[in-house]
Image (tube, rainbow, N blue to C red):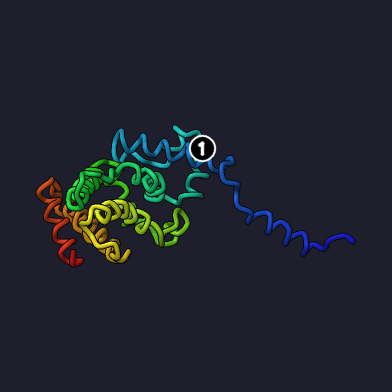
Amino acid sequence: MKPSRGDEATEVCVKNVVRPRPGGRSARVRRAVLDVVVELLEEGGVQAVTIAEVAARSGVNASSIYRRWRGVDALILDAAQDLSLGAIDVADTGSLEGDLCATTVSVAAFLRTDLGIAMARALIHVSPEVLERLCDWPQFWPTRLRRFEPVFARATARGEVADDVDQAVIASIGEMIAAQTYFLTLFRREEVDDAAARRIVRRALVAAGL
């Protein structure tokens, strides 16, 4: 039986919504584009990133870039979201406060880089719809806050922290540290050195009852 035009149209629609396979051409194009975005950020900061320049360097058509990312802020956020995890060291100094302080200093140092500044700006400007499309937004911050978990696991093993500390408490400490660090670095334009990090960490630990 010959399919009707309606059936043919439905088949076309289904074909059009099939997502590209991970690791296929779409992934290679994304990697080429985002590598160029990082290069441009390192060379000249946010102002150096334009769709035209990204297209010229990556060899990807500008209209294709715009269709996928919709703008420069989305490009920057997509490039930064993975790199930001690797750019921050979770220290092992031998004490809970020391680990948290060293990690806080590392976060602040990242936020002063062109990539860190660009990511913070993109997080503010990118629409919720774009955030959902580019990354698993509900897990964006929890993924980053979970980096504090090994710090508390070591502290528990050393006897500094009770072994029944709730994960929500650990997350709240991470949130308080991150909030103060972002505010001081990005809005107050203050350097978060070792002394400032100790103040931030102690406030968070006291507030959490530790």
Residue 146: x %, y % from top left:
34, 55
Q: Residue furthest right?
A: 1
The residue that appears at 46% across and 39% down in the rendered structure is 33
Q: Secondary structure beneath disc 1? A: loop
The residue lying toward the viewer, choosing from 147 and 5, is 147
The residue that appears at 16% across and 54% down in the rendered structure is 184
Residue 51: x %, y % from top left:
42, 42
Left or right position of 47 against 108? right
Where the N terminus falls, by quadrant? bottom right
Q: Residue furthest left?
A: 195
In which quarter of the view is residue 131 placed? bottom left
In which quarter of the view is residue 145 placed? bottom left
The residue that appears at 11% across and 55% down in the rendered structure is 199
Left or right position of 115 against 128? left
The residue that appears at 38% across and 41% down in the rendered structure is 50
Q: Is residue 121 visible?
A: no
**Where does label 1 land, which residue?**
60
The residue lying toward the viewer, choosing from 40 and 21, is 21
| Residue 155 vertical placement versus 48 (above, below) | below
Q: Is residue 11 visible?
A: yes
Where the C terminus falls, by quadrant? bottom left
The residue lying toward the viewer, choosing from 61 and 93, is 93
Residue 52: x %, y % from top left:
43, 39
Q: Amino acid at mark 1?
A: Val
Q: How many marks?
A: 1
The residue lying toward the viewer, choosing from 71 and 146, is 146
Characterize the local packing of mark 1: few (<14), some (14-19) or many (20 or more) Cα atoms within 10 angstroms: some
